[in-house]
Image (cartoon, grey):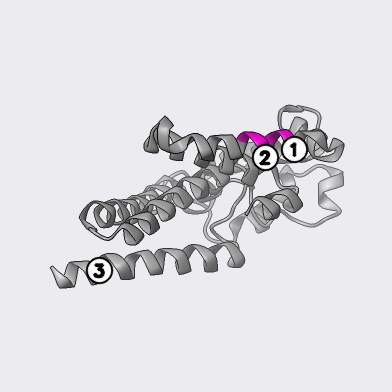
């Protein structure tokens, strides 16, 4: 996983992984979490020793970085589209149709925006606040079942699986702040595969009880 994060050059997953490590440590307690935090610290130091990675990490707070500017423009456009139709949004695929007026000349060379690099703003724009609330309710229902499975399971392996799946949900929520990941096929195949395994474990235990 660490190697995949390194070669991805994607800053969103770096931040998500850092939050996951911190949350895992906070839940587990210092005595059990210190190997995880130590490994995370070593990984961070090694990462920063490489000029390309350190520059990439530093660009997260760079207000002049082209990728950051593009995202800010997309988020502003998304909020404007949300205000146009706040309840139900502009409809699925509407961002690609209505985004050109919000793009600058350089952006238009690459075609209309297909998404807004943020799950929450993208849903606000295309589905409105009702659609976003429905999606968040769906995510909450998933988290509740994972938590219930973790609490009810007596098997250490299964509890670990629920624990890891819950952490992956946290990573998904954090990553969604800078990426529209919910409409990406590769992400969603992994998302539902992992959740499917967790739900199968949870409901298998429920039928036994």
Q: Residue 98's x, y, as percent?
A: 66, 53
Please determine whether, in this image, residue 65 is positioned above or below residue 9.
Answer: above
Image quadrant containing the N terminus: bottom right
Instruction: Determine the secondary structure under disc 1.
Output: helix
* Label 3: few (<14), some (14–19) or many (≥20) C-alpha neighbours in 10 Å: few
Residue 102 position in % (x across, y down): 72, 43
The image position of residue 52, as x and y in percent, is: 85, 40
In the rendered structure, which disc, 2 or 3, sits on the residue that comes first in sequence?
A: 2
Q: Going by the image, does 35 lie left or right of 186?
A: left
**Nearest to N terminus: mark 1 or mark 3:** 1
Q: x, y (%) of residue 2?
A: 65, 50
Tell me: residue 201, above or below residue 10.
below
Name the one closer to the observer, 109 or 68.
68
Q: Is residue 123 left or right of residue 9?
A: left
The secondary element bearing badge 3 is classed as: helix
**What residue lies at 41% left-to-right and 63% top-to-bottom?**
195
Look at mark 2 in the image and give the residue it sits on: 43
Please give the residue where the numbered disc 1 appears in the rendered image. 46
- The reply to whether discs 2 and 3 touch (Cβ–Cβ < 8 Å) is no
* 26 over 101 or under it: above or below: above
The majority secondary structure of the magenta stretch comes to: helix
Residue at 30% in and 54% down? 141
Residue 7 appearing in the image = yes
Check disc 3 and report the residue beneath it. 203
Q: Nearer the viewer, residue 185 or 82?
A: 185
The span shown in magenta is 41-47
> Is residue 42 magenta-colored?
yes
Whole-number angstrom distance, CA of label 2 to CA of label 1? 5 Å
- In depth, the one of 45 and 13 nearer the eye is 45
Q: Is residue 186 magenta?
A: no
């Amino acid at each position: 996983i660490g190697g995949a994060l390194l070669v991805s050059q994607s800053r969103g997953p770096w931040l998500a992984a850092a939050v996951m490590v911190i949350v895992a440590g906070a839940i587990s307690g210092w005595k059990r979490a210190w190997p995880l935090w130590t490994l995370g610290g070593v990984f961070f130091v090694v990462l920063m020793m490489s000029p390309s990675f350190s520059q990439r990490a530093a660009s997260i707070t760079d207000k002049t970085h082209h990728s950051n500017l593009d995202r800010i423009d997309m988020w502003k456009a998304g909020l404007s589209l949300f205000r146009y139709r706040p309840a139900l949004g502009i409809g699925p695929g509407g961002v690609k149709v209505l985004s050109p007026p919000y793009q600058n000349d350089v952006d238009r060379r690459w075609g209309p925006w297909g998404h807004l690099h943020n799950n929450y703003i993208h849903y606000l724009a295309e589905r409105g606040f009702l659609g976003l609330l429905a999606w968040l309710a769906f995510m909450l229902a998933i988290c509740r079942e994972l938590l219930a499975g973790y609490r009810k399971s007596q098997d250490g392996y299964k509890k670990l699986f629920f624990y890891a799946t819950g952490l992956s949900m946290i990573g998904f929520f954090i990553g969604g702040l800078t990426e529209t990941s919910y409409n990406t096929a590769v992400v969603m195949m992994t998302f539902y595969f992992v959740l499917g395994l967790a739900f199968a474990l949870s409901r298998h235990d429920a039928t036994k009880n």
